[in-house]
Image (cartoon, rainbow, N blue to C red):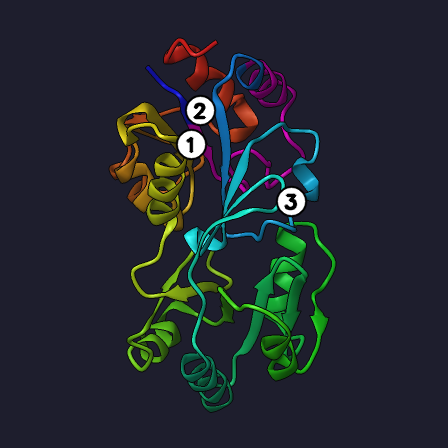
Amino acid sequence: MIKAIFLDVDGTILSFSTHKVPASAKSSLIQLYNKGIQIIIATGRSFGNLAEISDIPYHGVVGLNGAESTLCDGTVVERHAISLELFRKSMELSKQYDFAIAVEGNDGIFVDRINSRVIELANKVALPLPEVRDLWEVYQEGVCSQLCFYLDAETEQKVMAQLPGLASSRWCDVFADVNVAGVDKAVGVRSFVKHLGIDISEAIAFGDGGNDIPMLRAAGIGVAMGNASDEVKKHADYITASVDDDGLYKAFKHFELI
């Protein structure tokens, strides 16, 4: 019996083409929420960066790719912060390899510069350009659990080889999310099922990006959206239709959740 549903945002709940939640997904999630099934958002975004799905009911957020798990009232279930040493090394590599870098947290996304990749990502998710700030000040103001490196995959490999305490993941080819090594969405899923007092076999997870693979493998059932890459689909127990073709609704019906 499924007691918890973990849902990625971009490309799973939110359409990349319309930048909206399909009506079928919204109505289905409201129905499931009212049935008492735990709805948990599992995203590379932060807890405070979910305005586009504000009309979707949910109980908590696995944010920043598992680095921060938070209840809807703001209570932190689990957090994995990036150390000062690793932040300093990341900033040095950003200058050495000339890529933009950002700190992402509940107060927003702050970037050290605006370049073509930063602009491309903002356009892709239909969000304003991030604010340019001194990232050292941002780091000192609060907990830093996720960085964003705006670089290509080849440069990413060179950079990450010099940051053994951090790990990168991608859900698009414009940039990479960077978190403490060993932390991913599966870590967040496990922390939430423990908090909820249920078994992970009673959880179903939905995603479309490379950063969703760990949670698709960890959950009792992992569902890849039809718009997911072939690599993501290889790790899923079931493949549904795309987000724009009512994929969530069709999967809920397939598993007799609604």
Residue 100 seen in the figure? yes
Residue 212 lies within the magenta run? no
Badge 1 vs badge 2, beta-carbon distance below 8 Å: yes
Q: Residue 143, percent across and down?
A: 55, 68
State the residue position of label 1.
225
| Amino acid type assigned to the residue bearing label 2 in the image | Ala
Would you call the spot at circle 2 few (<14 residues within 10 Å), some (14-19), or many (20 or more)? Answer: some
Q: Which residues are magenta?
A: 5-31
Q: Nearer the viewer, residue 64 or 141?
A: 141
Residue 18 seen in the figure? no
Would you call the spot at circle 1 few (<14 residues within 10 Å), some (14-19), or many (20 or more)? Answer: many
State the residue position of label 2.
241
Rendered residue at 34%/75% (across/down)? 160
Rendered residue at 66%/58% (across/down)? 122
The numbered mark, 3 or 1, whose residue comes first in the sequence reads 3
Rendered residue at 26%/39% (across/down)? 217
| 151 up-or-down from 50: above or below | below
Query: In which image quadrant can residue 136 be found?
Result: bottom right
State the residue position of label 3.
50
